[in-house]
Image (cartoon, rainbow, N blue to C red):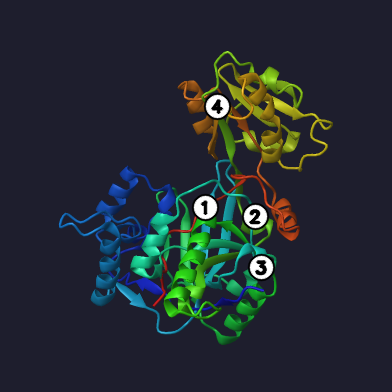
């Protein structure tokens, strides 16, 4: 099973600044405008390292990141923990329907292994994505700047505990409250490490970062000229946020499908009729997904409005019990009406926000959208237990851990 170990993290000295000003969202959701706002917010915001820009003197962005990280360490902006510890990390928010949600997990060093080795399992297929940028960041900074997110069926929530009165708590721009604390009690550290190592771990988020960490580990082994476990030193592991796989600790949003580039004359509802029975008109609001879950329906959104889609049981008899699998199967109908099943004349884009689906159709960027229900925690666990994977973009775990509460050096 995957070893999960404490480590001596690198944290900000927050005596003169709040983690609200110093941390940033994950790099892959930060666009240029947000990056500029975060950079202006504080000269030591994590975005300066995680998403660096070329220096006017000609220094490339990766060297800029490495130099900044070392400078901040030298100047005391960043401080190395005196001992190897785990870190408790909690995210709390109120959803659009007014329900309080939270996710509590532990940050530690997770030993890397390939999916076919059966210890760390991806839960869904991934879409193609360039990994060269993150790999170059690892080469230059020699540090884990952000964590992957892992799920375990081991009972760890009680071991992680809760923040104390002096531990940092801050609120991000989206209204999510974050809290960070040190777990250094020897018995708790031992128990937490043993619990995570007792079961296979499922990657919830950060599949590409995980694959990049594997590639970097292999490079470090080659540098050592010893291609065997342990020869890459700290690069044998990556920083991971591990959460117990239970409904109380996870908020899983659906990832809806937006269909772009389809000929406007195509009757999408008609093309999908063999797979779904069209139902009543649906209101698009904060309660739409809850209503879909209660009624067992998907929703088709077009320029003519939003209507329920009732799956035909006979059509999906051989299809997995996931809405994303149903949509993948049904889209072959659009392939036929588009006239070329090998290279469809449309593309599918993904988004978790219903407003984004509605706006894409209203603006004419998209012909239709299909709203899906979220995958359940039970379905995620079942998929992992069976060694299977869900279709790409099935789950969206919310909220996301920030970049900057803890870094992990690989030297």
Marks 1 and 2 sit apart, C-alpha to C-alpha, by 18 Å
Tally of marks: 4
User: Going by the picture, which residue comes out furthest to the bottom?
Assistant: 186
Q: Earlier in the sequence, mark 4 or mark 2?
A: 2
Q: Which residue is mark 3?
A: 117
Identify which residue is drawn at 54% across, 56% down.
207
- Going by the image, does 289 lie left or right of 403? right
Tag 1 secondary structure: loop
User: Going by the picture, which residue comes out furthest to the front?
Assistant: 225
Tell me the number on the disc at residue 346: 4
Quadrant, the N terminus: bottom right
Q: Which residue is mark 1?
A: 399
Q: Quadrant of residue 334?
A: top right
Tag 2 secondary structure: loop
Classify 115 as above or below 326.
below
Please state the horizontal and vertical placement of residue 372, each as a whole percent of the image: 65, 36
Please state the horizontal and vertical placement of residue 11, each as a whole percent of the image: 37, 72
Please state the horizontal and vertical placement of residue 328, each as a whole percent of the image: 67, 36
Q: Earlier in the sequence, mark 1 or mark 2?
A: 2
Classify 314 as above or below 409.
above
Marks 1 and 3 sit apart, C-alpha to C-alpha, by 30 Å
């Amino acid at each position: 099973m995957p070893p999960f170990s404490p480590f001596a993290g690198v944290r900000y000295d927050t005596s003169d600044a709040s983690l609200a000003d110093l941390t940033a969202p994950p790099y892959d959701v930060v666009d240029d405008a947000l990056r500029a706002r975060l950079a202006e917010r504080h000269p030591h915001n994590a975005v300066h390292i995680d998403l660096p820009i070329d220096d006017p003197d000609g220094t490339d962005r990766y060297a800029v990141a490495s130099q900044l990280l070392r400078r901040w360490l030298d100047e005391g902006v960043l401080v190395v923990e005196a001992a190897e510890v785990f870190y408790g990390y909690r995210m709390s928010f109120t959803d659009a329907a007014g329900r309080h949600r939270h996710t509590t997990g532990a940050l530690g060093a997770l030993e890397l292994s390939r999916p076919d080795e059966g210890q760390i399992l991806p839960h869904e297929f991934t879409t193609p994505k360039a990994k060269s940028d993150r790999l170059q960041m690892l080469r230059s900074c020699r540090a884990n700047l952000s964590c992957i997110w892992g799920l375990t069926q081991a009972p760890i929530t009680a071991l992680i505990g809760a923040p104390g009165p002096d531990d940092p708590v801050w609120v991000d721009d989206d209204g999510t409250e974050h809290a960070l604390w040190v777990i250094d009690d020897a018995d708790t550290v031992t128990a937490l490490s043993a619990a995570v190592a007792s079961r296979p771990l499922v990657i919830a988020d950060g599949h590409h970062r995980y694959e990049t960490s594997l590639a970097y580990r292999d490079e470090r082994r080659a540098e050592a000229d010893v291609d065997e476990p342990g020869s890459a030193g700290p690069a044998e592991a990556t920083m991971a946020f591990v959460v117990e796989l239970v409904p109380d600790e996870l908020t899983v949003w659906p990832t809806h499908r937006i269909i772009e580039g389809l000929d406007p004359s195509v009757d999408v509802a008609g093309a999908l009729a063999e797979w779904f029975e069209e139902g009543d008109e649906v209101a698009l609001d904060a309660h739409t997904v809850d209503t879909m879950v209660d009624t067992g329906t998907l929703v088709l959104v077009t320029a003519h409005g939003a209507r329920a889609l009732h799956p035909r049981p006979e059509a999906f008899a051989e299809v997995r019990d996931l809405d994303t699998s149903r949509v993948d199967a049904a889209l072959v109908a659009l392939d036929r009406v588009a006239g070329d099943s090998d290279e469809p004349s449309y593309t599918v884009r993904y988004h978790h926000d219903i407003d984004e689906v509605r706006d894409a159709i209203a603006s004419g960027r998209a012909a239709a959208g299909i709203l899906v229900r979220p995958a359940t925690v039970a379905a995620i666990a079942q998929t992992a237990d069976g060694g299977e994977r869900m279709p790409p973009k099935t789950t969206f775990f919310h909220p996301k851990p920030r970049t900057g509460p803890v870094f992990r050096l690989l030297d």
